[in-house]
Image: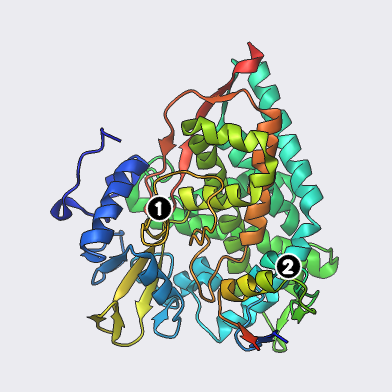
């Protein structure tokens, strides 16, 4: 099952992933990235590649 | 584009102010040549009164090199100045650049705190406000044209008030202070344009005065918000702590200035030049008006096409290599976003304005890296809402004169764009 790993040291809370795949990624009220169960793997992949700081990684 | 004369490498000087007031086709022809023939072209620095002239800079025009530099912040730092070519005195640099001219770890800490106020979900909550602002601005512009000779200035009547009111609402700026905010942020991002800063000798003075006025406003609001907190961004700034440490009043003031200036000028110029681009490409304009469903890609294309911030600077922290070429520590690089956004290696037919371009990995909000535009989601929202309202409420808007271009290398801007509402006659 493909999942996403977030490097918390690198994540800046830019929210680009959330724009690409809002059902998977959500910056909460504290600006901390929450990752939900993926429904759309293609959108999730796009979001991971779009991260400006390279904080996201797909793990198979 | 037959009127564009073919530039020659020797004649190019990106430090010449005149160049930056030239029409975009002319500038793009120059950048096409640089990208092809001299992708790290070296230029002497423009002279800024009272500031020592530095060693010169490389103009980075290829998408891949802009990305390589931007995504390696440890090798290419922002801390010695990202928004000016000259090395400004450190206190001035930090004051006017704030987060933009800061490196990790401090940049990361502060950025994470302010990022909370700019997440997609927080901004989703602002949609109603953006829509209300845009509707009011559009109605006023139509009224103004009807009361006068049927014309408006796209910059003053449409493009400027939208982001100004949105960011001032977010920050809780009183109505009485907003004209000053617009005027002083103009000065800070004027790049010394003679119309905005009359005497070049006085540029630094005008610049300092603008900072002082905005900082004064912030100081006043900070006192008020500490006594009576509200839910605005200014309250968040003055009450926020980074690792148990409060931001200093200078840091707060400089961030306040960054938000006001960056939140205003960029979106304003994307809107005004977007209007111009649509008037030059009527088929695209009709396409967007007929199908609001293309707004997502259309907004991205407007940002790619206009690239409102022309460059940011990085400085090599050690000897570095780019595309096989070596550069010594201390080398300065200007990342020309507008040039990268027309790189044929990435964008098919790059000089075509195509509102359904997809994918469109433009660097109009900056390239990969920790300095990616904090306000990107806000800007997208404002631009999308604005252009949909223009299509609906101002379908008869017609550009009726030459745009007055800002003579600034840093901001790709318009000072005025005359238009008329033909439906009024």
**Residue projecting furthest to the top:** B425
Can residue B329 be seen by looking at this rendering?
yes
User: x, y (%) of residue B250?
Assistant: 60, 73
Q: Which residue is mark 2?
A: B117
Question: Counting other residues with Cα less than 10 Å from the Cα at mark 1, is it few (<14), some (14-19), or many (20 or more)?
Answer: many
* Residue at x-position 35% and y-position 39%: B23
Q: Nearer the viewer, residue B250 or B378?
A: B378
Q: Which mark is residue B381?
A: none
Same subunit, tags 2 and 1: yes
- Identify the residue under disc 1: B191
Q: Is residue B88 left or right of residue B396?
A: left
- Which of discs 2 and 1 lies nearer the camera? The answer is 2
Quadrant in the rendering for residue B26: top left
Q: Is residue B223 visible?
A: no
The subunit letter for the residue under badge 1 reads B
Residue at 39% across / 60% down in the picture? B340
Q: Chain of mark 2?
A: B
Camera-side residue: B41 or B358? B358
Which percent across, then down, holds residue B346? Answer: 41, 61
Q: Position of residue B105 (x, y in %)?
A: 56, 87
Cα–Cα gap, marks 2 and 1: 29 Å
């Amino acid at each position: 099952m493909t999942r996403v790993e977030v490097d918390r040291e690198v994540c800046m809370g830019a929210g680009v992933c959330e724009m690409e795949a809002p059902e998977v990624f959500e910056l909460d009220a504290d600006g901390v990235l929450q990752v939900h169960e993926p429904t759309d793997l293609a959108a999730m992949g796009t979001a991971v590649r779009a991260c400006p700081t390279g904080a996201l990684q797909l793990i198979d | 584009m037959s009127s564009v004369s073919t530039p020659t490498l020797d004649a190019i000087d990106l430090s010449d102010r005149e160049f930056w007031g030239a029409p975009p086709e002319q500038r793009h022809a120059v950048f096409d040549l640089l990208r092809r023939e001299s992708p790290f072209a070296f230029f002497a620095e423009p002279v800024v009164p009272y500031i020592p002239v530095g060693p010169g800079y490389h103009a980075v025009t290829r998408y891949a090199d802009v990305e390589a530099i931007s995504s390696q912040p440890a090798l290419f730092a922002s801390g010695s100045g990202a928004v000016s070519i000259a090395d400004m005195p450190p206190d001035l640099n930090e004051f006017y650049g704030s987060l933009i001219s800061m490196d990790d770890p401090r940049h990361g800490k502060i950025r994470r705190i302010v990022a909370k106020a700019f997440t997609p979900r927080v901004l989703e909550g602002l949609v109603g406000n953006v829509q209300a602002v845009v509707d009011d601005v559009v109605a006023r512009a139509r009224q103004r044209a009807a009361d006068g000779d049927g014309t408006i200035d796209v910059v003053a009547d449409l493009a400027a008030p939208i982001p100004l009111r949105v960011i001032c609402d977010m920050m809780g700026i009183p109505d009485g202070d907003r004209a000053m905010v617009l005027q002083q942020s103009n000065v800070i991002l004027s790049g010394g344009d003679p119309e905005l800063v009359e005497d070049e000798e006085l540029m630094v003075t005008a610049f300092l005065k603008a900072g002082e006025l905005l900082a004064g406003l912030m100081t006043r609001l900070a006192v008020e918000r500490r006594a009576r907190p509200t839910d605005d961004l200014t309250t968040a700034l003055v009450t926020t702590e980074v690792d148990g440490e409060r931001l200093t009043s200078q840091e707060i003031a400089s961030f306040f200035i960054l938000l006001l200036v960056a939140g205003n000028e960029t979106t304003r110029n994307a809107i005004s030049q977007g209007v111009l681009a649509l008037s030059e490409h009527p088929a695209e304009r009709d396409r967007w008006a007929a199908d609001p469903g293309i707004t997502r890609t259309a907004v991205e294309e407007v940002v790619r096409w206009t690239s409102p911030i022309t460059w940011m600077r990085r400085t090599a922290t050690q000897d570095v290599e780019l595309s096989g070429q070596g550069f010594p520590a201390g080398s300065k690089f200007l990342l020309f976003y507008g040039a990268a956004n027309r790189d044929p290696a990435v964008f098919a037919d790059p000089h075509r304005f195509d509102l359904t371009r997809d994918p469109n990995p433009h660097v109009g909000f900056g390239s990969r890296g920790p300095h990616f535009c904090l306000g990107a989601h806000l800007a997208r929202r404002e631009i999308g809402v604005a252009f949909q309202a223009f299509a609906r409420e101002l379908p008869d808007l017609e550009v009726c004169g030459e745009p007055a271009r800002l003579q600034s290398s840093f901001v790709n801007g318009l000072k005025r764009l005359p238009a008329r509402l033909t439906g009024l006659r």
